[in-house]
């Protein structure tokens, strides 16, 4: 039982969806990204996703790509990501890393898992790693008590949903649209059906991500999901501040509070 599964189980018992907030480590710099994750926790995030900036983020839209490019240009390294995890986890909120697989493989799978656990991280979300190719990661995760969070999409077959859910722990990440990350004017109409299908094959909590940008949308998604995952809208708060870090964090805090109010009225 990790801090992540404990938190999601407690919130499920309270009939409230969790608010999961994503921010990339090192954007706009390491110190400010730690201030930002802390502000997000103080404003009501139940779980934090720390993004590992990567040069080929095939699943990410323009907002997260811009933030990742800026972080990489500023020289952020994997060791910086672990420091952001360490400082965020110290707030007491479950903290996971969202990363493409190549940086983990280059760092060393066993070494990455051990360092993540030592920093207080709960697990890893791997958007481009499928369970049938994840034996090395699964072994390392189990050895270090980390959750393995895999993704499913509306196009996933029932067989694929069952296999992915069986390999997952913590929660299953359901992408609500076929496409890249980014805020949208309306939430996906396919997400409720995907969650319903997952409910037929697993008792794990289901988190829905891609597209949520305000409290009303968080309330809508929280009506059928166990966790509402928000990324681009939060990152945009910092991106749109154009270097005014205090203003960006204030905007981030306000949006997180609105999202938290949304999940609280979801049911």
Image (cartoon, grey):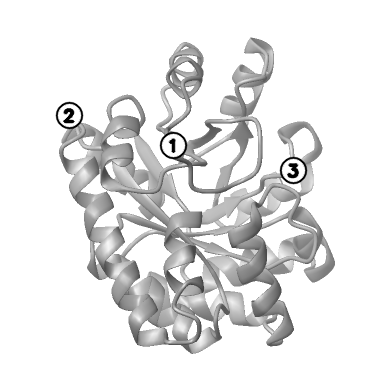
Q: Compared with residue 207, is residue 251 higher up or lower down, i.e. above or below?
A: below
Count all numbered tags in the image, as a single digit.
3
Q: Compared with residue 74, is residue 206 higher up or lower down, i.e. above or below?
A: above
Q: Is residue 32 left or right of residue 110?
A: left
Q: Residues within 10 Å of mark 2 (few under 14, many from 20)?
A: few
Badge 3 or badge 2: first in the primary sequence: 3
Placement of the C terminus among the 4 image quadrants: top left
The answer to which image quadrant residue 241 occupies is bottom left
Badge 1 or badge 2: first in the primary sequence: 1
Q: Which residue is mark 1?
A: 207
Q: Compared with residue 176, is residue 58 higher up or lower down, i.e. above or below?
A: below
Q: Compared with residue 107, is residue 216 higher up or lower down, i.e. above or below?
A: above
Q: Is residue 1 left or right of residue 267?
A: right
Question: Where does the image place residue 41, in percent across and percent down from the top left?
Answer: 30, 66
Query: What is the CA distance from the residue labelled 3 to the residue labelled 1?
Result: 17 Å
Query: What is the CA distance from the residue labelled 3 to the residue labelled 2?
Result: 33 Å
Between label 1 and label 2, give the one nearer the viewer: 2
Residue appearing at x 39%, y 70% in the figure: 89
Q: Residues within 10 Å of mark 3 (few under 14, many from 20)?
A: some
Q: Which residue is mark 2?
A: 267
Q: Are marks 1 and 2 in contact (CB under 8 Å)?
A: no
Residue 68 vs residue 14, the one in the foreground: 68
Label 1 SS: strand
Residue appearing at x 24%, y 42% in the figure: 263
Report if residue 171 is visible in the image.
yes
Residue appearing at x 62%, y 52% in the figure: 141
Q: Residues within 10 Å of mark 1 (few under 14, many from 20)?
A: many
Between label 3 and label 1, give the one nearer the viewer: 1
Label 2 SS: loop
Question: Where does the image place residue 252, in percent across and percent down from the top left?
Answer: 34, 68
Residue appearing at x 30%, y 54% in the figure: 46
Q: Which residue is mark 3?
A: 129
């Amino acid at each position: 039982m990790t801090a992540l599964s404990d938190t999601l189980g407690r919130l499920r018992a309270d009939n409230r969806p969790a608010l999961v907030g994503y921010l990339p480590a090192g954007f706009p710099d390491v110190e400010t990204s730690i201030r930002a994750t802390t502000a997000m926790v103080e404003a009501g995030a139940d779980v934090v996703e720390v993004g590992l900036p990567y040069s080929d983020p095939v699943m990410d839209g323009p907002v997260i790509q811009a933030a990742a490019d800026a972080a990489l240009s500023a020289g952020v390294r994997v060791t910086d990501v672990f420091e952001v995890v360490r400082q965020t986890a110290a707030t007491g909120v479950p903290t996971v890393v969202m990363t493409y697989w190549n940086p983990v493989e280059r760092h060393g799978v066993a070494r990455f898992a051990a360092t993540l656990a030592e920093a207080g991280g709960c697990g890893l979300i791997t958007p481009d790693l499928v369970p049938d190719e994840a034996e090395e990661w699964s072994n390392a995760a189990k050895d270090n008590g980390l959750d393995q969070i895999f993704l499913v999409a509306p196009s996933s077959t029932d067989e694929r949903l069952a296999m992915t859910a069986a390999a997952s722990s913590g929660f299953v990440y359901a992408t609500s649209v076929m496409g890249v990350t980014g805020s949208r004017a309306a939430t996906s109409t396919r997400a409720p059906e995907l969650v319903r299908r997952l409910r037929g094959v697993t008792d794990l909590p289901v988190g829905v991500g891609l597209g949520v940008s305000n409290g009303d949308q968080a309330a809508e998604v929280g009506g059928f999901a166990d966790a509402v995952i928000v990324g681009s809208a939060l990152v945009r708060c910092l991106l749109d501040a154009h270097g005014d870090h205090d203003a960006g964090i204030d905007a981030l805090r306000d949006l997180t509070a609105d999202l938290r109010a949304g999940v609280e009225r979801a049911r």
